[in-house]
Image: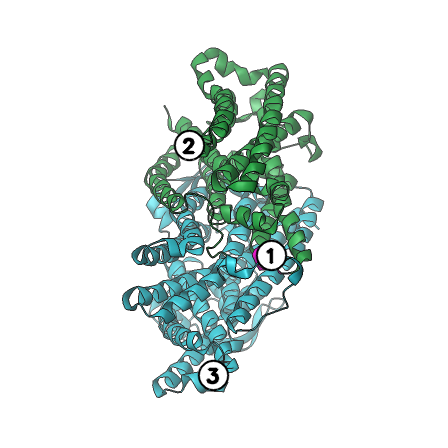
Amino acid sequence: MDLNTIWFLLVGVLITGYAILDGFDLGVGSLYLLLGSTEEDKQILLHSIGPFWDGNEVWLLTGAGAIFAAFPLVYASVFSGFYLAMMLVLFALILRAVSVELREQAESLKWRRRLDIMFSLGSFLPALLFGVAMGNIARGIPLDAAHNYTGGFFHLLNPYALLLGLVGLFAFLLQGSSYVLLKTAGQLQNRARSYFTRIWTAFVALYVLATLYTYATVPALFTNYDRYPWLYLVPLLIPAGLVVAPLMVKAARHGWTFVATSAIMAGLIGTLGLGMFPNLVPALEPGLSLTIYNASSSPLTLKTMLIIALIGVPIVLFYTIYVYRVFRGKVDVNTSGY
Amino acid sequence: MDAVFLSRLQFGLTAFFHFIFPPLTIGLATLIAIMEYFFWRRREEIYDKMVRFWFKIFAILFAVGVATGITMEFQFGTNWSEYSKFVGDIFGAPLAAEGVFAFFLESTFVGLLLFGRDKISPNMRFLSSVLVALGSTMSAFWIIVANSWQQTPVAFKIEGGRAILTDFSAAIFNPSTLPRFFHTVDAAYITGAFFVMGISAYYLLKGKNVEIGRKSLKTALIFALLAVLVQFALGHSHSVQVGNTQPAKMAAFEGLWESTAYAPLNIIGFPDTQNEVTHLSIGVPGFLSWMLHGDVNATVPGLKAFAPNERPMIQASFWSYRLMIMAAGWFAFLVAWGTYLLVRGRLYNNRFFLYAAFVSMLMPVLVNELGWMAAEFGRQPWIVYGLLKTNAAASPLPAYQILLTIMLFVLVYSGLLAAVFYLIRREVQRALGERFDKPDNADTFPSHTLGR
């Protein structure tokens, strides 16, 4: 396996880590208005993600940094090409961060309502737009010879990308609701359970539709699978997770539910990633695609970055797991916060 | 308006806004770790109270720093794609390393301390606060590595229109990294210390929350004294490095037009870019030559040694550098005054000093911005010194889209600033023992259950 392939996998791991971790807090944020009917429920929901959401966003920063370092041409093309969409995600994340903090300080009912809306909108938009971006990239985007994106903003809003946006959104909602099941009890947990079932049903429908749509319109994504059928093990994570998750909900084994929804998330990203390999950004005109070879940094940079990752990531995982263990169990709102 | 100008404006605005926060959080995190140390060793309750109070304020500043920091990292790609293509092989690695080595550490342990301070052992509590301080400092290191490579690029070769890394550690420790890192981190210490001094002075002036006010004022003052003293040496060494590695920038800082031996160190003057002279210039003769080269007779290149289209933004560099140094004089005076009062045992009731400390509270924040502006304006017209010009580095974006996002940034960041001000004021007022505004009783969740 060459360095470029290793970095392709590592970037995939970072994106998956981000989707699993920020996935649950974006999911909780998107469901916040539906689940949080009383002030106490809202406090519990906010406290459930309180210690983690900031750290989870670091996965996004590190992921972007890793793409910049390992595949700078992808970083340059995609970030400038999707300018307005990227900025929309940024503004959403900023509003979300502020509303979480202000929410706990606001004493007037009017301001709490406003901040509640800001918080859930700031969670919902990224949860939807990440999938839309993935959909566009999977389908291929118009690039010129200098690898600059030539479509406009509205070109990004095509039916295929919007469908994948919905798949992504419901994966985030699934992740969010299984996290709420894990961290809460009583009424709130019951409500989360009934939403979980509905989200699960919608996700299954969207997933089947998206798979058929992909087969019909983006057959290129299946070539790797045709060549190496054992790769199907990765997409199989999705149906496996979809079968296991509701069983675990029924058995009230919520830790395993969370593992199952995380597997679905990993399966989604893995499915697209393996389908695209070795392309990173397929162009509509195939010769202009950005691949792990023509878009990458030099071998020296890739090697240096690999050493950094091999030293740094285990340390990060070690203390992240430690901190999650400190907060294991149901949420306790009697701890301090912002 | 052209897209390059708008992208520069947007980057400048968002960087200015973002850079309000990191120095405050680096300085505060370090001071809080010191307070935690005293609590850990001495078990005096006052230190616990101090830590809890300052950490709340730290957390507000930290969250805004994170949110606005994501903007910075995205913008290299969104607005400066040609730059990103050119430098990606070298510039991306420190940004990724910042995430892995610094930012994860800081944010994970901030979350732990914010929500779980009472769930962990005293040893772990102290260790966590040290890790937060360490994370924020290492974060500064990697960001300054990246920016320093733009100032003094080394260890690369140009291949296919891109800068390709040839030696990682030489690129990391390029000639300006360490002088700039130490200078910036020490400035952050001063910033955090002045912030703590200012709020503590406010309590002492009000005669409320006096216990925390006194102890915090004393701790921060001693810390500030050390940081200011060290900064004279660090600032000097950074200037010498600029003079040696970026002579055009140094000439702009000094308003020096002609290349001269026995070059003076400018105190004041008014650069005139039309006539290429600096009016009413008063300086210490020979001092600049001596400072840069250890020899009063050494020749220092002036601005005229550089083609007009390769000169920095002269007025902006000159004035931001000069105002930064003037402010340093005030900081030195203030900490010297405070130290004198402390030794004499009159620190806590000299109202003139307390008032001066209060009004100077955010001055270092502005001075950090001046330092940053001096560094960036002084590097122009280059985005990577001597290699790539700023006007060749922007993304091919339609100008209206950038204009749109600039307006949104102004709007959102104004709201953000108002929110930060409101939140901090609230924390400060709460500790004063007064309610900041009346609670809305209609649907108020009992505040004791939030552990306030």
Q: Give residue A2's position: percent from left, percent from top.
A: 37, 25
- Count of marks, rendered view: 3
Q: Tell me the element at label 3.
A: helix
> In front: mark 3 or mark 1?
3
Question: Does residue A243 appear to the left or right of B14 in the view shown?
Answer: left
Residue furthest front as drawn? A186
Q: Give residue A156's position: percent from left, percent from top.
A: 66, 31
Q: Are the residues under badges 2 and 3 in a single subunit?
A: no
Residue at the disc numbered 2: A10
Query: What separation in Å lies between label 3 and label 1 (alpha carbons)?
Result: 34 Å
**Crowd band around label 3 with a 10 angstrom C-alpha radius: few (<14), some (14–19), many (20+):** some
Report whether residue B257 is seen.
no
Type of amino acid at the residue the image marks with label 1: Leu
Q: Tell me the element at label 1.
A: helix
Q: Nearer the viewer, residue B426 or A149?
A: B426
Type of amino acid at the residue the image marks with label 3: Phe
Disc with the residue nearer the chain's start (3 vs 1): 1
Residue at the disc numbered 3: B353
Q: Give residue B224's position: percent from left, percent from top.
A: 40, 72
> In front: mark 2 or mark 1?
2
Q: Does the magenta stretch include residue A105?
A: yes
**Crowd band around label 2 with a 10 angstrom C-alpha radius: few (<14), some (14–19), many (20+):** some
Residue A86 vs B339, above or below: the answer is above
Colour chosen for chain B: cyan
Colour chosen for chain A: green
